[in-house]
Image: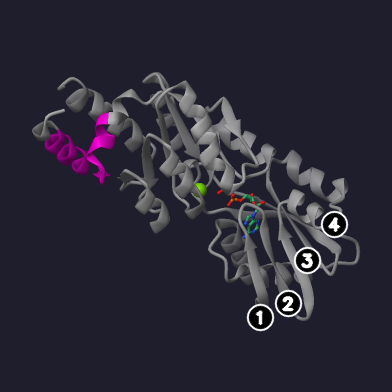
Amino acid sequence: ATPTAVMVGTGQGARAGILVKNAEALELAEKIKVLVVDKTGTLTEGRPSLIDLRCAEGVTRAELLVLAASLEQSSHHPLARAVVEAARAEGLAPQAAEAVQAVGGKGVTGRVEGRAVQLGSPDFIEGLGVAVPPALLEPLVSAALTPVAVAADGRLLGVMGLADPLRASSKAAVARLQAMGLRVVMLTGDHPAAAARIAAEAGIAEFRAQVLPGDKAAAVEALRAEGRVGMVGDGINDAPALAAADVSFAIGAGSDVAIEAADLTLVRSDLNSVADAIALSRATLGKIR
Ligand code: ADP
Ligand code: MG
């Protein structure tokens, strides 16, 4: 496109709530075939809450919540915030935690009150050698909640079930993108059952669940064999996938790392802005060559 067309497009984008960091990306947006969409914080509000909690025998709800909140208080993960809020709402104060380590896409480990505590996805906890009994896990999975298992000193304390609501604008935005001819694919590190629920609510037929942060970029790369790929994300863990896409969009309310990695920033944190950007690209830039 001519420099003038790009300037006009960039200005129109800004008025529509799309901040263009890379003008070339706005031109490329016209021909996006596959749009990869992160789940947590992009399709959803990114504000999960604790819905259910199942304790192992002899474990109290308070004991489990205090240990979990103690590990989570230093984490910025959306699930971590939900756990800390749930503990506080029940009048429980998180305790000091030591040697806290976040394991990306899996969970957190550390020491609380002299105990070795681990929490995260059931797969992560089982990988540490602690069985997660189906009697505790299944009710949460059946309800399509995100399960977070908690263990201390090699024993399972229980499983929490969390849910993060779909953004009010997501369903209509996905329908609009699909009507524009895009294939929308959801990518998430979440459990398959929780992922399936959000995908269905959003009207997305195709999704990949339990994708580790390091594998998100490879998933985007693989889709590039099928045409030009756009990616929308909000989190630190989305940055490599954003960088791997032909055109990348960051949710404005997302992490600085995602915004830094993306070509375009959506001021309104609304997927409709992705459709607006593609429409703008088609209308003002695509035809001026
Ligand atoms: P997403 O792709 O939805 O952003 P992540 O890759 O951040 O998800 O996390 C994937 C999974 O890892 C979560 O669904 C959860 O089971 C587990 N997990 C990661 N970090 C944490 C944490 N701080 N607290 C609890 N669970 C966590
Ligand atoms: Mg996210």
Check disc 2 and report its element: helix, strand or loop.
Answer: strand
**In this picture, is 101 found above or below 20?**
below
- Residue at 80 percent across and 48 percent down: it is 137
**Front position among marks 3 and 4:** 4
> Whole-Å distance between the Cαs marked 2 and 4?
19 Å
In the rendered image, which residue does mark 3 sit on?
Answer: 61
Q: Amino acid at mark 4?
A: Gly
**In this picture, is 216 found above or below 235?**
above
> Whole-Å distance between the Cαs marked 3 and 1?
19 Å
Question: Which disc is residue 96 wearing?
Answer: 1
Check disc 1 and report its element: helix, strand or loop.
Answer: loop
**Front position among marks 2 and 4:** 4
- Residue at 57 percent across and 25 percent down: it is 205
In the rendered image, which residue does mark 2 sit on?
Answer: 112
Residue 185 appears in the figure: yes
Q: Amino acid at mark 2?
A: Val
> Whole-Å distance between the Cαs marked 3 and 4?
23 Å
> Whole-Å distance between the Cαs marked 2 and 3?
16 Å
In the rendered image, which residue does mark 4 sit on?
Answer: 129
Q: Position of residue 13 (x, y in %)?
A: 21, 39
Disc with the residue nearer the chain's start (2 vs 3): 3
Residue range highlighted in magenta: 6-27
